[in-house]
Amino acid sequence: MNPNGSARRSRGGRPAGWAHGVPAVLAGLLLIAACDTVEPGGGEQLVIEAFVEAERKLPAVRLWRTRPLELSYTFGASTAVEDAEVMLRVGPESFPYRPLAGRPGWYEPARSDAPAVPGRTPVRLEASWGARHATAESVVPPPLRLDSVRVRVPERPVDGIILDSLFFDPARLDSLQFDSLKTGAAKGLVYLVEVTLHWTVDFEEAGADSAYWIRTQLRPDLPTRPVFEDFFFRPEQVFRERDARRADARRRVWTGVYAVPVGGVDEPLPPHPLRVALLRSRQDYARYVASRRDPERREPASNVAGGLGIVAGISLDTLRVPVH
Amino acid sequence: MLLGLVVPAAQAQAIRIDLDRAPLREALLDFGARHNVDVVFSERQVASQQTTCRYAGRRLDDAFACLLRGTGLRAERVRRRQYVLAALPPAPDASAPPELPRGSLAGFVADAETQEVLPGAHVYLPALGLGTATNEAGYFVLPALPVQPYRLRISHLGYQVLDTTLVAGAERGVLRLQAASLSAGEVTVEASRERPALEPGVVAVPVQQLDQLPTFPGEPDLFQALQWLPGVHRAGEVGGGLIIRGGQPDQNLYLLDGAPVYHPWHAFSLVSTFQTETFKDVRLYQGLFPAEHGGRLAAVLDAEMKDGARDDPRVLAAVGMLSGRFIVESPLSRSVSFMVSGRRSYLDQLIGTEHPVSEGARRDTLRTGYFFYDTSAKLTLRPGLRHRVSVSYYRGRDVLDVRLPFDLSLDFAEWLRPADLFFEVDQHWGNRLVSTRYQFLYSRRFFLTATAYRSSYSAREATLIRPTAASIVASAYRVRLRDLGLKLDVDYYPALAHQVRAGVQVVRRGFRSDLAARIQRSPGAVDSLDQGSRSEAFEAVADVQDAWQVAPRWQLQPGLRASLFGEDRLLRLSPRLAVRYAAVPERLVLRAGGGIQVQYLHRVRDRYAYLYDLVSSRWLPAGTGAPPATSLHGSAGAEVYPARGLTVALDGYWRRTDGVLLPLDVFQTKDGLAGPGIEVATLLGQYTPGEGRAYGAEIFARYERGPWQVWASYAGARALTRADAGPGRRFRPYDFDVPRAVRGAFSRRTRHWHASLSADWRSGFPVTVPESRYALGDPLDDAPIRYLYRPEVNNGRLPPYFRLDLLAGYRFRVAGVQAQAQLNLYNLTNRRNVIDRLYDPASEGGVEARDRRGLPLLPLLELRIEL
C-alpha cells in the first residue's frame, strides 16, 4: 500500500440493522429517566400523648389530630380528638378510657378505682378513631426519689453573653452566609447557679434494669432567661442512668447550671423558686425528649404505631426550692 | 450480539471463485463484500492488474492466494477478518512460501511547543480503520504490522490533527502536536472524527476549553469546569461536593499523579484544590472504571500534572477575586524539566489577621484570619526515550484562625476593644502528597509504570469559648488519614488486536482521631473528654484488563480487579466488561459496559457536636459494623458524528449500590457542644447501611467550528436511597436528586477577545415538605409544642434552578507581556434562586414557607499575565 495513494477498503458486511435503532432507544430513555415521582402525600393522623407514672393512678391521656398546614392550630376542640375509643392495658389488665368532660382531647379511666401502677409493669395503649388504629407500648420504670438537692449561688454576678438568638436565622442566609455574623448577642451580667442532685439506684443495673434513662431539669421561675443557656450551661440533660456520675456504689449525682441575668454588678440574685425534676424512663422517651426541642427543624421521635406521639412509662420526682 | 461476534456466520462459509482475467480491484471488492472480509489496498497496487482464479473451499488464505496469484502481491492478515495487500518480497527459494517481515508502529506523542507528552492522544490508521490511544507516558504501539509505510492520523482534544507517515518496524520517534492556537483569528481545535470512541462513562475532560466557560468565583477551577458535563452537579449552589451521576461525594476518587486526594476542596468547598492550568491530562470515569482504578462507587477523576515545559521557561501569574496564583515551568537541561505552581487567597491580607486592641490598661489581640493555599510541583527526568522519572508534590491547606467577641456584629468598629467574652476557632485542614513515578519502555511491547506515593489528609479543630467570666470551653480535635501506596502497572501489546494492562498495588492506610476537651459551665460543673481512635488497614489489589480488537468494528475490554482489605481480610472481585462497536465507521459508534465496584472506606461525620467534625471528615475503614459498599453498574451509549465539527453523545446508565452509610436520623444536625463522642462505634451508631439506585440518560452535543464553540446537554436522571433501618424503608429521592438538567454554553474566541454565555437550568433539589401540623406535651413542660408532620423525607422539590452567566475576556500585550483581563458576570439575570425552604410550626395561624435564596448578580474579575 502506498501511503500517499488513495486507499480503498472493501468493507465486509454492513452494520447490523439494530445498531441504527440504538440512538433512538437512548433518546427515548432521556425522557423516561427524568420522571419525577416526588410529591407530598396527605391524610389526618391520630396523635397520642400518654405518660404512665410509677406508683401513681392511671393517668389521663390526650389525643390530638394533625391539621393541614394552611389552617390555624390552637390547643382546643379543633385539634382534639373527642370521639376515639381508648384502652390502656397495664400488665394483664385492661382499662377502658372515656372522654374527660370539659377538656377536649383528654381521656380518663372509665373506672374510678383504677389502681396505681407498680414499677416494671408493661403498658400498652390502644386508640381507635374512625378507621385509624394506633398502639404504643412501654414499661413503667421503678420509682425514683431525689435524695438531696444542693444549690450553690455565687456571691457576685459575672460578665456573660446574653443572646437574642445564638444561631442565626437560616432563612436570611445566602450561599456564602454573609449574614452569619448577625448573632444578636449582647454582654450582660449573670449569676451562674449550680444545682447538684443526688438519687439512689436501689436495684442491680442488669438486664432490663440496665436500660433506663434519666432526665434532669432545672426550671427557675424567672421573668427572663438567656436564650443560649441550653447550649453553654446545663439546665437540663438526658443521659443513660448507668453512665451517671457516682457518689458511691448506689448514689448517683448530677450537677446542672442555669443563669440568672441581673442589671448591675451589685445587684443581688433575685429570689425565685426553682423546680428541680428527676425523671426515669426508657429509650423511647429519651429519644422523644432529645428530639423535641427544635420544632422548626424536626418533629419528636414517636413510639406510636399507626399514629404519632409518645406513650411512655415514667417515674418522676420533683422538688421546689426557693433560691435566694 | 456477542454470539454473532464470536462465531460469525462467514467463518465456515463456503468460498467459490471463478474468474477469468477479471479486474483485480473489482474482484477484491466483490470478494470482501461477499465474505465479510475487510481488504485494505491502495489504488496504485491494483491499477491495471487482472486476476484469473478458480477456487472452491473454506480457507480465506487460500482464496486470497488464488486471487493474487501472479500479481506480485499477497494478503497479510492484520487481525480477525481484516487483510492488507502488500508486495511480495523476492523469495530466495521459489518453492518456499514467502514470509513478509512484521514490525511495530510505535512512538511517543508530545506537545510540539512544550514537549509535554500527551496521554490519551488518539493514533489512528485510516487505511486499516485501526487505532489506539497513548498511555500516561504518551506512548503508543501498534504491533505485528507488515513492514511498510503507514499513514497515521494523530489527534488530541485541544490540538491540531497531525497527519504523518511512519514505517512499521522503524525506530520509535516523537510525534509532536501543535496546540490549538489563535491563527488569523481562528481557533483550529477540532476533535478528529476517526479517534476511537471512549468507553461508556469516560470523559476526557477538555480542560482548556472548559476553562473558557464562566466559573465561580471567576478563577480557573477543575471542578467548576466539570459541572458543564452532563450528570455532574455540586451539592450546593456554588460549593459542596461533586455529585456525579447521583453518587454521593465520598463515592468519588480524586487522583493526582496516581495518589488519592481525600479532601479536594478549599474555602468550605467553594473552590477545588485542582487548578486546571497545572494539568496536562484529566480523565473522568463515571461509574465504569478501568480495572486499574477502584475503591469508589461513583466516579474516578484521574488528573496528571504537567511535566514542565521543555523548550522555554513559562510563567503565568494571575489575581482573581479570591486568590492570586502563579505557575512556572521550565527546562533545567535537555532531559530535566519542572513545574511549580502556587495559589493563596488574600482576603486575610486585606483585612488583616491580627488586630491589637486596647481599652484603658487592658490589651487584647483579636484575630480574623482565614486563608487557603496550595502548592504543587513536579520534576521530570527523561534520561532517554525509554526512561522517565517524575516526582510530584502537592500540599493544600485551609487555615481559619478567629478570635472575636461574642457580641460582634457587622459593624466592625464595635470589635475594636478587648474581648472578655469571646470565641476562638483555630482550624487547619488539608492534604499533602508526594508521588514518584518511573516509566520504562522495556521493549516495544512492554511498558512498565511504577508509582510510589504517600498521601495524607489531616484536620485540626481547636476551640476556645468564654461565654461568661466563670465559664470556658476548650477543645482540641485532630483527624488524620495517611496512605502509603506502591503500584506497578505493565502495558503489554502481544498482538495488534490486544493491549493488555495488568497491575498490582499495595496500600497501607492509617486512621487516627483524638479529642481532648474541657467544658466548664460554672466553677463547680466541669466535664472533661479525652478520647482517641486509631486503626490501620492494609489493601492489596491485582488487576488485569485487555483491550481486544475482536474484529475491525468490534472491541471488547474485559477486566478483573481483585482486592483484599483490612484485618478481616475482605476479599472482593470486581469484574468489568466494555464493548464498543463502530456501527457506521466515522459516523456512529455504539458502546456498552458493566461492572462491579467496591468501596472500603466510608466517610462519616458526627451529627451532634460542634466541638468536632465541624470542618473535618472522618474516613473509616470497612470492617465489623460497616461492611464495604458495593455497586453494580451498567451503561450503554452512542457517539454520533453527524456533521463536521459536531459530536453528539448519548449515554444511559443504571447503578445499584449496597452497603452505603446513611444517617439513621436524617433530621439530626449538630445542636450541642459535646455529642456522643468520637469512638468509631459511636460514630457508626449514627448511621445505618443503606441501598442506592441511580439511573439516567444523557445527551451531550458539542459543536466546534473556527472560533465558535457550542456545548449543550440534557440529563434525565434519578438517584434514590433507602436505609436498612429507621422509619420507612421505601426508596426516597437522594438529597441531590436532579431529574432534569439542561445546560448550554455558547462561546467565541478571536485573537484578542473571547466571550461565553452559559445557561444552567435544573430541577430543584428535593426538600422535605411537611404534610400537616400537630402538638404534643410533656410532663415537665407547661404547654404543648407545635410540630410539623413530615412522614416522608425529600417528598417535595424546590423550584427549578436557573442561572445565566456571561464571561468576557480581552488579551493584550503590555510592556512586552501577554496579559488577559477577564470579567465574569455571575447570575446575569440576578435571579434569586431558592436553595432551601424552611417552615415555622410555632405560629397559631397557617404555616408559611420561608425561602433561603441564592447569590445575586456578582461581577468577578481576573487579571492574568504570561511571560
Image: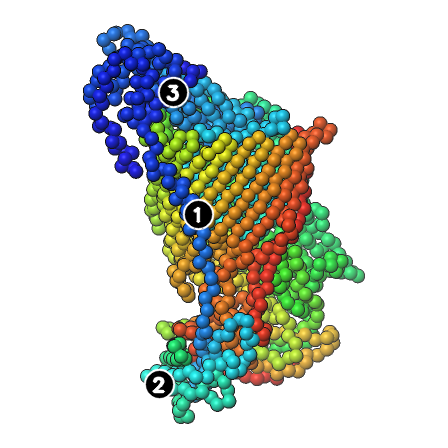
Q: Indicate which disc, 1 or 2, sits on the residue closer to the N terminus.
A: 1
Where residue A156 appears, as percent x and y from the top left, is 69, 74
Q: Do the residues labelled 1 and 2 touch (CB within 8 Å)?
A: no
Labels 2 and 3 within one chain:
yes
Quadrant including the C terminus of chain A = bottom right
Question: Seen in the image, is A212 located left or right of residue B361?
Answer: left
Q: Give the residue type that dot 2 points to.
A: Ser
- Residue for point 74% across, 76% down: A266
Question: Label 3 belongs to which residue?
Answer: A8
Crowding at dot 2, Cα within 10 Å, few <14 / some 14-19 / many 20+, comes out as few
Where residue B422 appears, as percent x and y from the top left, is 67, 61
Residue sitting nearer the eye, B235 or B636:
B636
Q: Give the residue type that dot 1 points to.
A: Leu
Distance, label 2 to label 3, CA atoms, is 95 Å
B165 w.r.t. B485: above or below: above
- Residue for point 43% across, 37% down: B639
Q: Give the residue type that dot 3 points to.
A: Arg
Distance, label 3 to label 1, CA atoms, is 39 Å
Quadrant including the N terminus of chain A = top left
Crowding at dot 3, Cα within 10 Å, few <14 / some 14-19 / many 20+, comes out as some
Residue sitting nearer the eye, A222 or A183:
A183
Q: Residue A94 carries which label?
A: 2
- Residue B527 shows in this picture: no
Question: Label 1 belongs to which residue?
Answer: A30
